Amino acid sequence: MESLLANFSILLFMHLCIQSVYYIAFQKRWPDQVVEVAHVLIVVIGIFFLYQLPVVLNNYWFDLRTIPMVILILYHGSRLGVPVLIIVTLARFAFPGEFIMLELLFTLFIPTVVTLLIRERLFRNLTYLNLFLYFIGIWLISDAIIGYIISDSVTIYSYFIRFLSFQLSALIMYFFIQTSTRNLEMSEQLRFYAEHDSLTGLLNLRSFLRKAREHESHVLKVVAMLDLDFFKQINDTYGHLNGDRVLADFAAFLSEQDDWLVGRYGGEEFIVILEAATKEEAYDRMKTLQRSLSKQQFITEMGEEIQNVSVSIGLAELDQQNPLMTSVERADKCLYKAKKNGRNQVCF
């Protein structure tokens, strides 16, 4: 019983370490490659400790190494599973013992190959029942077979204990993985909505200003303030839901135009920071944007085309020596001039 609890503890501690890596990576924004290497190393070390602390039952030694191997393949495929399989296989030959090839074949290689073959189909409808049935199959082709081959003291009781420990471990691991995955997804959603506008998906003003300060460049940088013309009229004519639709579609159009930094300033106003060789180039790029917008279709939910969507634009050179909002205010004044000059204008 002590050795079985030790195997449970190793599996849970392995999961805790992996979960901690993903949460730290989420907070620190670690690269995916660093996270993957850490994940592989944790699983390798966990399987090594499972091998070192086997469960002894009626003179038959077994461990639960198949479970983390199969779950890793199930969630991450061959990208992480194959490196773990290779490292664990090579490490196993460093320790003497009988039936090494049979042990590796039935506890690691066959479960890995089977999981790789059916993981996509299984993952599309992954429930506790399906996982339970799947791990019954995994147990039958791994522990059940090798136990029968290499053990002379196979009993119904020993099979029951091995089966029960295998299934409980797998389901408990799945429960903790699902819980931590949902928590991480919720954290990612909270971060996204803390940094982005919920309607358009663009950066909100606070995040936009922070990213603008972080991005340093020796090229001329220009702040552009954009305001959709006669937007109140769009709301009054087509309804506020279709007005929101225009904002979302315009945000998507704006993001596709260039590699500039785009954010929503508020209401129907948007803010852009672009790099240009000269002021004239920045001006020409905004005029090109207006011409492209005149060809863009905006459709209501009922399929009716919204006519004459245009934008007024104010530009100001970004002054690196003064606060960013100083340049934003100057661009906003130029936007007011563009509106006053008849709308659908660019004013520098």
Image: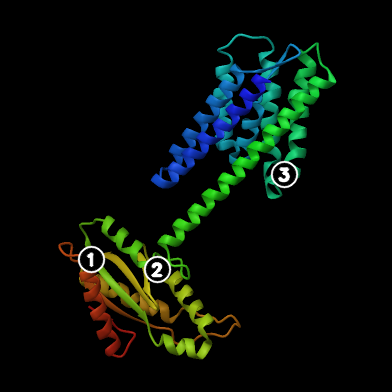
Q: Which residue is mark 1?
A: 324
Residue under numbered circle 3? 128
Callout 2: 10 Å neighbours few (<14), some, many (20+)? few
Question: Residue 92 bears which disc, if any?
Answer: none
Name the residue located 22 percent from the left edge and 60 percent from the top edge.
219
Q: Quadrant of the N terminus?
A: top right
C-alpha separation, residue under disc 1 versus residue under disc 2: 23 Å
SS at circle 3: helix
| Horizontal arrangement in the rendering, residue 103 relative to residue 48 (left or right) | right
Residue type highlighted by circle 1: Leu
Location of the C terminus by quadrant is bottom left
Residue at left 71%, top 40%? 118
Q: Residue flagged by tag 3: what amino acid is it? A: Tyr
What residue is pinned by disc 2?
A: 257
- Mark 1 vs mark 2, foreground winner is 1
User: As displayed, is residue 291 above or below residue 254?
Assistant: below
Q: Residue at x 43, y 42 (%)?
A: 24
